[in-house]
């Protein structure tokens, strides 16, 4: 038995070396979670005007933009008065399919077309896979701090399958925001659910079982030391996310799920999102801010990944909800022609959400009428 021990040890060492090499190769491959989820044909664009950003794709970016325009508001010039548009939506707002040099997103093209581009601020917030609960909180936060003249609201059926607030929202709501949101049952429920989740996440990260013990400090120092020695250890969170994305992609491939697969609504999530949309409209009306909701452009040359009956009933509910709350509803479903769409770059996937630069120009032109102060 003793003679076999060195060989057993050698096999273990060889296995560790092979595993470490494989992990290094896996970690060396470039990984952008947003690009993996969207696809290689899609580019998210953040726009600036006179050196100042006016579109955001995350909650921290949105908060930073609000602070910037609070500190240095848009000023009038000659016959042009300041005019601020809060433009809320998902990644359709800031993603260009098959991006080319010189391409821009709808908010930029809108600013190009208005008569007073330097004093018109299309404050665009495009959160990937945004739901109406998140749009409601963003609307409250921004309109409480900036003089918003009109809200443009992208209405995408996909967002109704999403639920709750992403972790980026943690800590954004100040007491005044919480009081305002708490006036609506759905606003209070959204905040309470999210805050409970965030507290549990923080508690898990801090490992409360070790709090107050010497072991916690030892483990923290050990972790920091290993991160300096081993790039793999330092990058383990990113590798975990990459692995989860790869598992998700493999699962969809094995089950034959792609962008054309019909997704059924989840009733509880649908109800919460529609309640949040109603609260969003009520809040805007209470603050004297017009809302222009538009049913988002949808690819027309292929059957969409929606149940036809569910989609039709949703549009019917919007047609009733918006006038009841003093808001305007328009449809841009058929605005973007088939030639202006494309693929996501993933195998077997076509894109039903993101279009090319010319599609962004069409959306901007369609919304131009509502972006002129003298026409309101």
Image: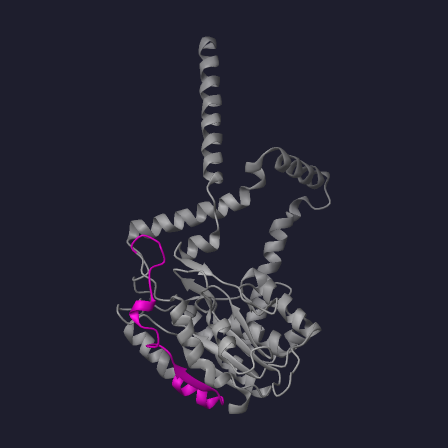
Q: Residue furthest front?
A: 78
343 magenta-colored: yes
Left or right of 90 in this view: 197: right
Q: Residue furthest top?
A: 3
Pinpoint residue 166: horizontal percent, then vertical percent: 54, 62
Pinpoint residue 101: horizontal percent, then vertical percent: 45, 60
Residue at 32 percent across and 77 percent down: it is 334
Residue 130 or 112: which is nearer the viewer? 112
Query: Which residues are the magenta region?
Result: 319-348
Q: Is residue 330 above or below residue 235?
A: below
Pinpoint residue 360: horizontal percent, then vertical percent: 42, 71
Q: Is residue 332 above or below residue 4?
A: below
Left or right of 117 in this view: 218: right
Colour logic? one colour
Pinpoint residue 302: horizontal percent, then vertical percent: 26, 68
Residue at 42 percent across and 64 percent down: it is 96
Residue 34 or 321: which is nearer the viewer? 34
Query: Is residue 375 among the parts visible in the rendering?
Result: yes
Q: Quadrant of residue 312?
A: bottom left
Q: Pick the quarter of the image with the N terminus.
A: top left
Query: Is residue 376 among the parts visible in the rendering?
Result: no
Q: Is residue 57 above or below residue 361?
A: above
């Amino acid at each position: 038995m003793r003679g076999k021990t060195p060989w057993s040890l050698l096999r273990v060492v060889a296995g560790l070396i092979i595993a470490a090499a494989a992990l290094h190769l896996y970690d060396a491959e470039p990984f952008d979670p947003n690009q993996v989820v969207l696809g290689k044909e899609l580019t998210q664009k953040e726009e600036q005007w006179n050196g100042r950003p006016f579109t955001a794709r995350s909650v921290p970016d949105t908060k930073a933009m609000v602070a910037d325009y609070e500190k240095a508001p848009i000023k009038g010039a000659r016959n042009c008065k300041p005019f601020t548009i809060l433009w809320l939506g998902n990644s359709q707002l800031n993603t260009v399919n098959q991006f080319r040099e010189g391409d821009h997103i709808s908010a930029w093209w809108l600013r190009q077309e208005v008569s007073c581009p330097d004093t018109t601020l299309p404050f665009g917030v495009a959160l990937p896979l945004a739901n109406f609960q998140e749009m409601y909180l963003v609307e409250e936060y921004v309109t409480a701090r900036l003089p918003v003249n009109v809200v443009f609201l992208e209405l995408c059926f996909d967002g109704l399958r999403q639920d709750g607030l992403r972790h980026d929202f943690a800590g954004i709501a100040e007491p005044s925001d919480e009081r305002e949101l708490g006036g609506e049952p759905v606003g209070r429920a959204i905040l309470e659910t999210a805050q409970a989740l965030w507290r549990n996440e923080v508690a898990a990260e801090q490992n409360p079982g070790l709090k107050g013990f010497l072991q916690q400090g030892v483990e923290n120092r050990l972790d920091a030391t290993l991160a300096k020695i081993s790039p793999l250890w330092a990058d383990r969170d990113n590798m975990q996310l990459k692995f989860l994305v790869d598992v998700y992609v493999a699962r969809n491939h094995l089950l034959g799920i792609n962008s054309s697969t019909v997704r059924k609504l989840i009733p509880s999530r649908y109800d919460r999102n529609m309640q949040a949309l109603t609260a969003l409209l009520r809040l805007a009306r209470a603050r004297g801010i017009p809302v222009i909701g538009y049913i988002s452009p949808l690819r027309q040359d292929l059957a969409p990944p929606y149940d036809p009956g569910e989609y039709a009933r949703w549009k019917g509910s919007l047609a009733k909800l918006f006038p009841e709350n003093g808001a305007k509803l328009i449809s841009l479903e058929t605005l973007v022609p088939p030639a202006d769409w494309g693929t996501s770059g993933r195998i077997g996937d076509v894109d039903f959400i993101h279009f090319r630069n010319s599609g962004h120009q069409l959306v901007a032109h369609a919304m131009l009428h509502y972006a002129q102060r003298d026409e309101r």
